[in-house]
Image: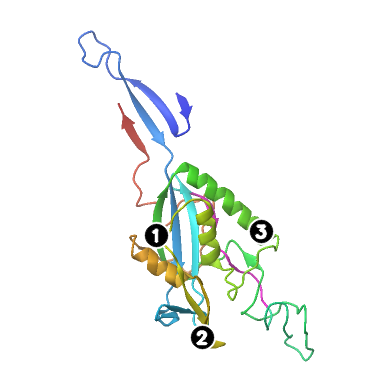
Amino acid sequence: MTKTPTGTIKWANIGSSSTSPVEQTVRRIVELDVFYLVIGFEVNSADAFKHEIHDLAIDYGHAFYYVVKNLKIVQSFSFGPHGLGKIGWLDKGRSTGKQIYTVGAIKKDGVKNSRPGTADYEITEKVKSFKIPITGKQADALIQNTNKARAEIYSGKLTYSAIVNDTCAETAKEILDDSNIDTPSGFGWIKHSSISEIPIAYAVNPYKWHRAFKASYDEVTFRPGDPPTWRPIVGEADPIYGTLSSAKSESIT
């Protein structure tokens, strides 16, 4: 038995008699590592995406992904807010009390600005998911690039901000692009109707990205348990496609 870059090779004798037409031949059974990517979306509000515009005031939506090797999750990325923001714009704002801050406002309870982030944002709604086969090389690059992004988030270097589009979908799309994994364009107009009906950005957003995926890939719906709280956990079996995947071995003569 020997190890190769693509898996494990087992040698088995299948003929040895002097009259056998397969004398001195062997069959190689190659057990290949199978990788794929799952991209999931929480996009369950019909009112949040109308006329090709995503309205953050109605629903932010959510996009996440995880990497699977031989039916086990080996990496995940679910970028979302973790903690409260402040009221105001950028580094200006006001507190919830009487004192007015003009610069360096403490992050409090706003939702329109930068907030601390997490790369393990929990899934609480119905998920609409898509499966993309990837190579071992792509998987390695994606795992490394995801590790970098996760480190930036937990060090505070990368924060969650819907207004400047440091968000789940935009950040996930960047990581996938950097890992040479092609996905449909998720760029579309974004507005926040509590601020203005005029779009404030043209960027990747969950609703537009999901629409683009659905045009090219088969969709599978997944409902988290009761209570409906779940997140991809490294080392666990793929809960969406694990029972749908075929065996990972093939024979080569």
Q: Which residue is mark 2?
A: 198
Q: Position of residue 108 (x, y in %)?
A: 70, 79
Q: Residue furthest top?
A: 18
Disc on res. 152: 3
Distance Cα–Cα, label 3 vs label 2: 32 Å
Q: What residue is shown at x 72% (from left), y 83% (from top)?
A: 93
SS state under label 1? strand
Q: Earlier in the sequence, mark 3 or mark 2?
A: 3
Q: Residue furthest right?
A: 99
Residue 204 or residue 244, whichever sits in front: 204
Mark 2, residues whose alpha carbon is within 10 Å: few (<14), some, or many (≥20)? few
Q: What is the basis of the colouring in this image?
A: rainbow
Front label number (3 vs 2): 2
Distance Cα–Cα, label 1 vs label 3: 27 Å
Give the amino acid at mark 2. Answer: Ile
Q: Which residue is mark 1?
A: 130
Boundaries of the magenta span: 73-85
Q: Is residue 17 above or below residue 104?
A: above
Q: Is residue 150 magenta?
A: no
Q: Is residue 84 magenta?
A: yes
Residue 117 lies left or right of residue 101; in this view the side is left
**Which quadrant would the C terminus be assigned to in this image?**
top left
Q: What residue is shown at x 65% (from left), y 81% (from top)?
A: 110
